Image (spheres, rainbow, N blue to C red):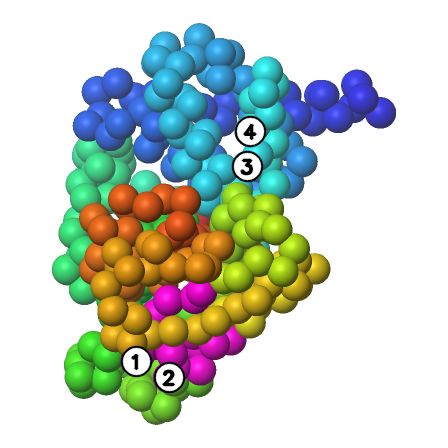
């Protein structure tokens, strides 16, 4: 059984990687894209083992840190899990369905035949096409990411952009209300799950599609919260406008449910009602959990008291994005 698995792992990764030193594309990007393409075409499957960092360094003749960076980006995108000393194990899919991949493969074959008939160099043509498509995507991104604030939307959008490999526009709810006229039927909206109903009301039928994605609270942050004494006193600090949003309250309920065994004594307050940050630093609370919007506006004062003020720390749930990716037809 082990021998069969090892042979499958070797054949899966065999011939997968190559490095074009003449191309103006960084080595980590080339490695990352080669894995994504192999996943899209079904040449890699969950459970397949990629070469160790040292082995790939020797095979491609590139620096170890460049290989590590590529593997780390793939791990951040939820496609592989790095295994110390062995390489990386494929854990995710990067294809929507066989229909999309087969259509793409057929089109590639037709284009390659035309390129050869015209006497063009295939690699040069591919680089020119790649740059042209990236420029068009940057000029008119079809993905719009929405969250409660511009800051959170930017953070969510950056993670979506990294995972999907496309440009993403971002807007907070307030800006979306003002600029909803720029949203067209070509726009695909990805929104924090807790604000799905708000976005649907704002946009009505303007967008081509509105899809929910979700945040996960950072595991280290949740563990830090669990480390507080039983029955500790905690203040949740937001702007007054945020406390009026249903999504904010639902998100906080989800967080508190994960630490309910600590029986924390929780108080909600708006920054406008508490006075200065310095005053809060001397308060009776064991911890003050600060919203991202408040933190970004008052970071210098808050960071002077790291034991008292904790930033609400979260990241994109890649499984929720994967479900949306399939519906949108993103292969890579």
- Tag in front: 3 or 1: 1
Relative to 186, is 247 on the left or the right? right
Which residue is at the front of the view, 71 or 196? Answer: 196
Answer whether residue 243 is magenta in the image: yes
Q: Residues within 10 Å of mark 2 (few under 14, many from 20)?
A: few
Please determine whether, in this image, residue 11 is positioned above or below residue 127: above
In the image, residue 136 lies in the stretch drawn in magenta: no
- The reply to whether callout 1 and callout 4 are in contact (CB within 8 Å) is no
Label 3 vs label 2: CA separation?
40 Å
Residue matched to label 4 = 82
Tag 3–tag 4 contact (CB < 8 Å): yes
Residue 180: x and y, percent?
Answer: 22, 83
Label 3 vs label 1: CA separation? 40 Å
| Residue bearing mark 3 | 80
The residue positioned 35% from the left and 21% from the top of the image is 66
Q: Disc 3, disc 2: CB below 8 Å?
A: no
- Quarter of image, res 138: bottom left
Q: Is residue 72 left or right of residue 155?
A: right
- The residue depicted at 49 percent of the width and 62 percent of the height is 234
Q: Residue visible at 57% across and 58% down?
A: 232
User: Can residue 53 be seen here?
Assistant: yes
Residue picked out by circle 1: 241
Q: Are marks 1 and 2 in contact (CB under 8 Å)?
A: yes
User: Which image quadrant: the N terminus?
Assistant: top right
Q: Is mark 4 on a helix, strand or loop?
A: strand
Closest to the camera, between mark 3 and mark 2, is: 2
* Chain part drawn in magenta: 235-250
Residue extending furthest toward the right: 1
- Nearer to us in this view, 77 or 27: 77
């Amino acid at each position: 059984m082990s021998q069969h698995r090892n042979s499958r792992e070797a054949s899966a990764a065999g011939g997968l990687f190559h490095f074009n030193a003449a191309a103006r594309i960084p080595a980590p990007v080339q490695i990352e894209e080669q894995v994504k393409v192999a996943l899209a075409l079904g040449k890699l499957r969950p459970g397949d083992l990629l070469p160790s960092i040292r082995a790939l360094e020797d095979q491609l003749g590139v620096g170890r840190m460049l290989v590590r960076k590529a593997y780390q980006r793939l791990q951040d995108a939820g496609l592989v899990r790095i295994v110390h000393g062995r390489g990386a194990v494929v854990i995710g899919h990067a294809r929507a369905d066989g229909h999309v991949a087969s259509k793409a493969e057929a089109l590639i074959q037709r284009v390659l035949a035309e390129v050869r008939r015209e006497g063009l160099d295939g690699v040069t043509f591919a680089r020119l096409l790649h740059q042209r498509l990236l420029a068009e995507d940057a000029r008119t991104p079809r993905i719009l990411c929405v969250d409660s604030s511009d800051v959170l939307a930017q953070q969510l959008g950056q993670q979506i952009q990294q995972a999907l490999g496309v440009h993403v526009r971002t807007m907070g709810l307030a800006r979306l209300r003002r600029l909803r006229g720029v949203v067209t039927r070509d726009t695909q909206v990805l929104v924090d799950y807790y604000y799905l109903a708000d976005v649907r009301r704002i946009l009505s039928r303007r967008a081509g599609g509105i899809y929910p994605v979700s945040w996960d609270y950072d595991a280290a942050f949740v563990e830090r919260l669990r480390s507080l004494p039983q029955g500790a006193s905690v203040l949740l600090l937001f702007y007054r406008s945020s406390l009026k949003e249903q999504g904010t309250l639902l998100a906080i309920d989800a967080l508190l449910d994960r630490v309910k065994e600590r029986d924390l004594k929780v108080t909600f307050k708006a920054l406008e009602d508490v006075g200065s940050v310095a005053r809060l630093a001397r308060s009776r609370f064991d911890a003050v959990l600060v919203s991202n919007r408040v933190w970004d506006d008052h970071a210098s004062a808050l960071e002077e008291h790291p034991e008292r003020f904790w930033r609400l720390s979260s990241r994109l749930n890649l499984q929720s994005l994967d479900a949306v990716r399939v519906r949108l037809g993103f292969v890579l």
